[in-house]
Image: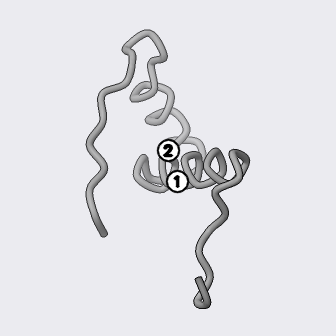
Amino acid sequence: MKPLNVEVPEDLQLHRRGTLCKLDTGMSLKEQVAAAYDEWLTRQGYDRPTDQT
């Protein structure tokens, strides 16, 4: 895995909300960020690479 270090606006309270989600679902913050970013990129037209691309 490669780290993804970015600053985000504090008013979004992403860390707090992610912690609450982890407590409710057991999904780590790392997994939450990966899933959300992957979904956003896919919706923007940047599909996941396949073995052929």
Q: What residue is at 48 percent from the left and 16 percent from the top?
A: 12
Vertical order, 21 against 8 (above or below): below
- Packing grade of label 1 (10 A; few <14, some 14-19, many >=20) is few
Q: Quadrant of residue 49?
A: bottom right
- Vertical side of 40 occupied by 31: above or below: below
- Identified at 49% across, 44% down, the residue is 22
Residue 52: x, y in percent? Answer: 61, 90
Query: In the drawing, does residue 44 fall left or right of residue 18?
Result: right
What's the residue at 37%, 24% (across, down)?
A: 8
- Local crowd at mark 2 within 10 Å, few (<14), some, or many (≥20)? some
Q: Amino acid at mark 2?
A: Lys
According to the picture, the residue beneath numbered tag 1 turns out to be 26
**In what quadrant of the picture does the N terminus appear?**
bottom left
Q: Quadrant of residue 19?
A: top left
Q: How is the image coloured?
A: one colour
**Which residue is depicted at the point 61% across and 50% down?**
41
Mark-to-mark CA distance, 2 and 1: 5 Å
Pointer 2 with pointer 1, Cβ within 8 A: yes
Quadrant (top left, top right, bottom left, bottom right) of the C terminus:
bottom right
Three-letter amino acid code at disc 1?
Gly
Q: Secondary structure under badge 1? A: loop
Measuring from the top left, give residue 46's x and y in whole percent: 64, 57
Q: Mark 2 — residue?
A: 22
Q: In this rendering, would 26 be left or right of 9?
A: right
**Image-based side of 6 in relation to 40, left or right:** left
* Secondary structure of residue under mark 2: helix
Above or below: residue 36 compared with residue 42: above
Image spot of residue 24 (x, y percent): 58, 42
Q: Nearer the viewer, residue 4 or 25?
A: 4
> In the current view of this chain or complex, which residue is farthest to the bottom?
52
